[in-house]
Amino acid sequence: MAQEKYLIFANSTSDTMMFPASSIAFLENTDADTMQIHFHPGTDNTAGSVIFEITSGYGVDFAKILFRNIRNSRESFIVVADDVNSDYLKGSVGGTTVEATACTTIALL
């Protein structure tokens, strides 16, 4: 059985959230440097979304990096955008570093 992966987001010490990767509903590039991930409701019927900044113009590439990390990481916890610890998911595309650069909004719906 595959191990569940969790995505971590933090924009302050009092605004931190971890979502199961399996609950991703869809990703949305809201502009050239902003991405939003929408999450399906969990067992408590709470859905959520996270808005974060990425390297401008690399939305599709960042999505590929994210899903590659979910598929290949041996870790259960994957930090996507953590402003508290300055820890951001990144990868390389044609010699360019593509990464999350800030976590702006974490919302439960």
Image (cartoon, helix red, strand yellow):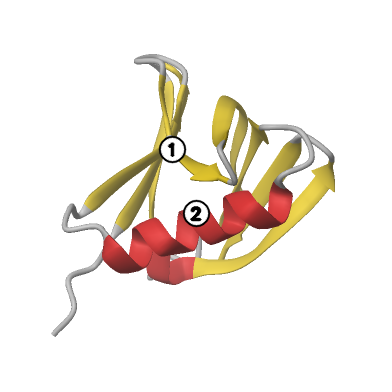
User: Which residue lies at the image location 25% right of the left edge and 48% below the top edge?
Assistant: 77
Identity of the residue drawn at 79% across and 40% down: 57
Q: Which residue is drawn at the image coordinates 41% and 16% (left, top)?
A: 86
Q: Is residue 82 above or below residue 4?
A: above
Quick check: 14 left or right of 30? left
Label 1 residue SS: loop
Q: Where residue 98 appears, x then y in whole percent? A: 58, 37
Mark-to-mark CA distance, 2 and 1: 8 Å
Identify the residue under disc 2: 65
Q: Quadrant of the N terminus?
A: bottom left
Q: Residue furthest right?
A: 31
Image location (x, y in percent) of residue 85:
34, 15
Which percent across, then down, holds residue 91?
46, 42
Q: Is residue 47 shown left or right of residue 84?
A: right
Image quarter for residue 39? bottom right
Density class for disc 2 (Cα within 10 Å; few <14, some 14-19, many ≥20) is some
Residue at left offset 71%, top offset 49% = 59
Query: Is there CB contact under 8 Å for labels 2 and 1?
Result: yes
- Give the residue at mark 1: 89
* Residue type pointed to by label 1: Leu
- The amino acid on which the numbered mark 2 sits, given as a three-letter code, is Ile
Question: Is residue 79 shown left or right of residue 90?
Answer: left
**Residue 47 in view, yes or no:** no
